[in-house]
Amino acid sequence: MIFPIFFTFFLLLSSSHASVQDFCVADYKAPDGPAGYSCKKPAKVTVNDFVYSGLGIAGNTTNIIKAAVTPAFAAQFPGVNGLGISLARLDLGPGGVIPFHTHPGASEVLLVVQGIIIAGFVASDNTPYLRTLKKGDIMVFPQGLLHFQVNGGGTPALAFPSFSSPSPGLQILDFALFKNDLATELIAQTTFLDAAQIKKLKGVLGGTN
Amino acid sequence: MIFPIFFTFFLLLSSSHASVQDFCVADYKAPDGPAGYSCKKPAKVTVNDFVYSGLGIAGNTTNIIKAAVTPAFAAQFPGVNGLGISLARLDLGPGGVIPFHTHPGASEVLLVVQGIIIAGFVASDNTPYLRTLKKGDIMVFPQGLLHFQVNGGGTPALAFPSFSSPSPGLQILDFALFKNDLATELIAQTTFLDAAQIKKLKGVLGGTN
Amino acid sequence: MIFPIFFTFFLLLSSSHASVQDFCVADYKAPDGPAGYSCKKPAKVTVNDFVYSGLGIAGNTTNIIKAAVTPAFAAQFPGVNGLGISLARLDLGPGGVIPFHTHPGASEVLLVVQGIIIAGFVASDNTPYLRTLKKGDIMVFPQGLLHFQVNGGGTPALAFPSFSSPSPGLQILDFALFKNDLATELIAQTTFLDAAQIKKLKGVLGGTN
Amino acid sequence: MIFPIFFTFFLLLSSSHASVQDFCVADYKAPDGPAGYSCKKPAKVTVNDFVYSGLGIAGNTTNIIKAAVTPAFAAQFPGVNGLGISLARLDLGPGGVIPFHTHPGASEVLLVVQGIIIAGFVASDNTPYLRTLKKGDIMVFPQGLLHFQVNGGGTPALAFPSFSSPSPGLQILDFALFKNDLATELIAQTTFLDAAQIKKLKGVLGGTN
Amino acid sequence: MIFPIFFTFFLLLSSSHASVQDFCVADYKAPDGPAGYSCKKPAKVTVNDFVYSGLGIAGNTTNIIKAAVTPAFAAQFPGVNGLGISLARLDLGPGGVIPFHTHPGASEVLLVVQGIIIAGFVASDNTPYLRTLKKGDIMVFPQGLLHFQVNGGGTPALAFPSFSSPSPGLQILDFALFKNDLATELIAQTTFLDAAQIKKLKGVLGGTN
Amino acid sequence: MIFPIFFTFFLLLSSSHASVQDFCVADYKAPDGPAGYSCKKPAKVTVNDFVYSGLGIAGNTTNIIKAAVTPAFAAQFPGVNGLGISLARLDLGPGGVIPFHTHPGASEVLLVVQGIIIAGFVASDNTPYLRTLKKGDIMVFPQGLLHFQVNGGGTPALAFPSFSSPSPGLQILDFALFKNDLATELIAQTTFLDAAQIKKLKGVLGGTN
């Protein structure tokens, strides 16, 4: 088979309009919708939109929970917009804890890269699923269920959660209950917790009422 | 476990951009897309967006079908935008009828709250599924299939349909056929109805040709 | 247009195999999968599969929370299997409470049919959205977020939640934390609650450890 | 770069279990579910599962509507199971008509290959969209909306509809209303048609009551 | 049943806002998102948006592959936006070839309308599925898998592929590898092809480096 | 608020049938379908189903590409079945290469944990997106597009790809073309490669014809 070096090739898909395909890099300035952010104009997309280096930096664990979560969701990493996936970085200092939380819109798979992590989730029938994870282990937390991670060793632990959505959301139980102005009495009524306990945690977390 | 009362907590998810998560309250002034309306800016969202009181008001059943449908779809109720669900209110006066219709984009579950309703749908194999429903009964009408509701008692009936989409659509058979300018001959050809019958219903419903 | 009374019509869609279309009534005896239960054989489907009367019966509210939830999910109501929707009934006696909970797999729209209900949810950014609902009001609780309902009047209240999934799931916060054998110390570490508080609620709810 | 001729290559994805990927050819003997038929064992799949020749044969248009539809849905063509697409063949003799119908679960794009076809659909707001199509034209009928096709020339017409689902369903209006045992009075009440008209069409189509 | 000729009918669904339902004709000037283009304002939609005549014109096969593909994707055919389906036209002159390619976002069903086409795809386990197709045959190519079409007769062939997405995408293997500035050495390393072979094809297809 | 220590709590969701919710751990012995494997009976599910340790073991890179991929897809890791996510491990020895490949059913985000990796993908318009990634960097490869990874340093590299599907699939270009019995002439015709080049690679990879 011999080819001429130069020739006019057929123009395949030379559409008259910018096409919706391959990817939809987030344009944070245009309106967003239920499926995600609007797409950047193709001419403005570069490889930088598909690479994120923020997870290479350790989070600051000098805080009350001795832990930090660094997200690479669609809001931070424009290239995953519309693609059904995102990541984050989880740093757990010695004694560090990511307290009970849910991701309302995604399942999670946690990859342990360093240290020992005790992780668990609770199913709808209240059964807890608990495991001590070591380097290289992965554990899945099904969508929307309460789960937690705790440093299970005496040294810093590092893990990377992956999510089945570019915008998985994150609702931390303590923050949802105590870091706002929900009335103590209403919280008591809807959690069965004692008022004194609620007021104590509101004090710690900055809630009022 | 002892907490200091004040401390700097870790800033979790303090994203640099408004995030797409939790919900997408409809912004009726921005462009809409295949997945629904654009999202209101988070700062403008209030609890009013998540509550709708329009279904508390009885529809006016002084009309030819002695019935009324009041929708709470995404077009009326901005909080359901993108969330895969919506509701409506169905008032059936004595003798009231919601004639054969379909919802092109959703399945429906009808909840009877007052009175007696005869409801039915027809499957693709032409089998009818009919039932007389009383207060507290629910019946499901699978997506896109022809169905109807008729007041089966001598008193007003009230029901609330739920839909598996924030924009289920509604195509009423008689309106689709007779309440427009489709030529009588074309309707006759594509429905097998007699021209006289078609012209009569066009007259009733305001169609022409 | 004249038709002969009897004729051999064209056999449309006389497929050689049972077809997957219109609906998929749950067959509880066959394997289930990520999309729901297997489908009942078409020949065994009757109108009873599409109607459910269990929501017509008031739940028993003589219990600690003075409340009851009666589900009509795919596990109870075979007709909604695969159709993206389900319902439930919510009875709240005077002083009744449905404590903080989530539905991991669905958004909810609550319809108040009788009485006064104080309802609320907390968003991922910890903002609470609270409202006192009266008869006819509807309120949406976006997927996976913590929410609650409380009887806001002195008389029984009745409401019907609709869900955007045939199997929305239900995770009640107190049950998930205290109605199992999770170690008190681990709960304290992952919720910041005092051990005494945890042990008290384990006692109430039947948890151990 | 030089390669040894023989070597032991790495075994990529030599999973211990049959994998769910690439395709899911329908196994008509196993249970089906909301997402479609079960998958044939990989070892039994052949190229024949991916090819269908039934659309090459003209349908018999010697019938009352002078038309025939030949489906290649998942029930006939196992290779499209789970893949979100299917086809059919449409033969319209001179004067042939595919009367008003819907596909409850799919949008359709009709491709005209021979002859002249007048096609139309009616939107939810009752607006009709009508067009005379010639060879090479395509027309889209959005999901669930009433539409029809009529031979618009004096010669046979041939078209191929494509669907956005492997099991689009097909509900023909006249069959749904008149080709079963729905009571004439109930049909009259829910369609506004005259009883005489209903009985006439029941007679033609084989309905009773 | 008697109707007055004129009356005020109930206003069903007279929503206060333009509704998202039935269809979402592409507005190419507004932002697009992961689910497709924004929707044209309902008042501007006409039947022309739902009909496309571009596939009625034979593609120019006077080129190196003696073949042409004419797309009717959402970028060309606004009516299919958001509807999960699109079409294209495939012209194969004698000796014509559509070389190995994938559609990253859709499965394809190919309908042969004229001539003989040899088509094939390769599964993830490297099994090839090959078939010689004649007029009326259809063949499915599951999503994302490498496939090709070759004119298998001495006369022009014509076929129409349907896709399970309005924007299926198209990645032609040779173009992806050789019609850009990827370094020859890097291509050699990631394809095992000889540098001379790569340079030869870069020359033919207009690539550099 | 005072609670009695023992009481009969309301039985919430004590469904009469095993419910489809929370998760669907793969049962490899039951039929699979388009949405994934059947679900294990709830009583047989343990925490082991949600944890996978196989990615903790380095793959054997003593092979022609000096690389290894270890999957934790639904076929290996039953807990991710139906949850829209999976992981894998990628070992690249010095000089190691994962040649051009696609995942037909998923987008990928690659996380570099050790070493230097040069990664790239090619878009549908043939634009290559290339980047040298270091520890902590992540890069997204949109669904279905050709991409590759190469060790860019002199030391072993380790990375973990996450996928937006529990069964992403993997089609390696060279294997698809050369590791089977596709005729050399047909490959030449559909890839423009020289027959000698094809035969050489068939020899290396174990293909015939």
Image: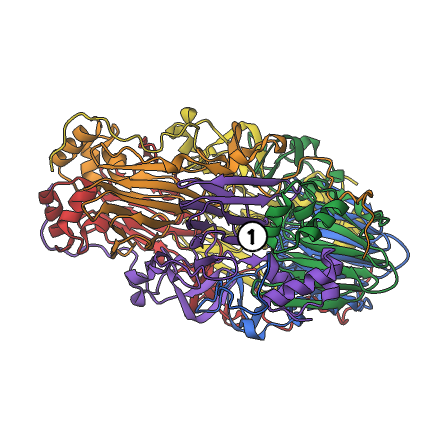
Chain colours: A yellow, B green, C blue, D purple, E orange, F red
Q: Residues within 10 Å of mark 1 (few under 14, many from 20)?
A: many
Name the residue at the right extreme.
C154
The one of D58 and C72 positioned closer to us in this rendering? D58
In the rendered view, tell whether residue E93 sits above or below residue F176.
above
Q: Residue at x 50, y 33 (%)?
A: A76
User: In which quadrant will I find the N terminus of chain C?
Assistant: bottom right
Residue C147, placed above or below residue D201: above
**Which residue reaches farthest front?**
C2
Quarter of the picture holding the C terminus of chain C:
bottom right
| Residue D102 in sight from this viewpoint | no
Q: Position of residue B174 (x, y in %)?
A: 69, 50
- Toward which corner of the image does residue B148 lie, by quadrant? bottom right
- Taking the image as shown, residue B162 lies to the left or right of residue F68, namely right
- In the displayed structure, D204 sits above or below A104; it is below
Residue E193 percent location from the top left of the image: 16, 40
Horizontal arrangement in the rendering, residue D84 relative to residue C174 (left or right): left
Judging depth in this view, the residue of B158 and F128 nearest the camera is B158
**Chain letter of disc 1 in the image:** A
Residue D133 seen from this side: yes
Q: Is residue C114 left or right of residue F148?
A: right
Residue closer to the observer: D119 or F192: D119
* Residue B87: percent from left, percent from top: 72, 50
Residue at which label 1 appears? A148
Camera-side residue of C129 and D44: D44
Amino acid at dot 1 = Phe
* Image location of residue F26, percent across then percent down: 45, 64
Secondary structure at badge 1 equals strand
Is F151 situated left or right of A75 in this image? Answer: left
- Count of residue discs: 1
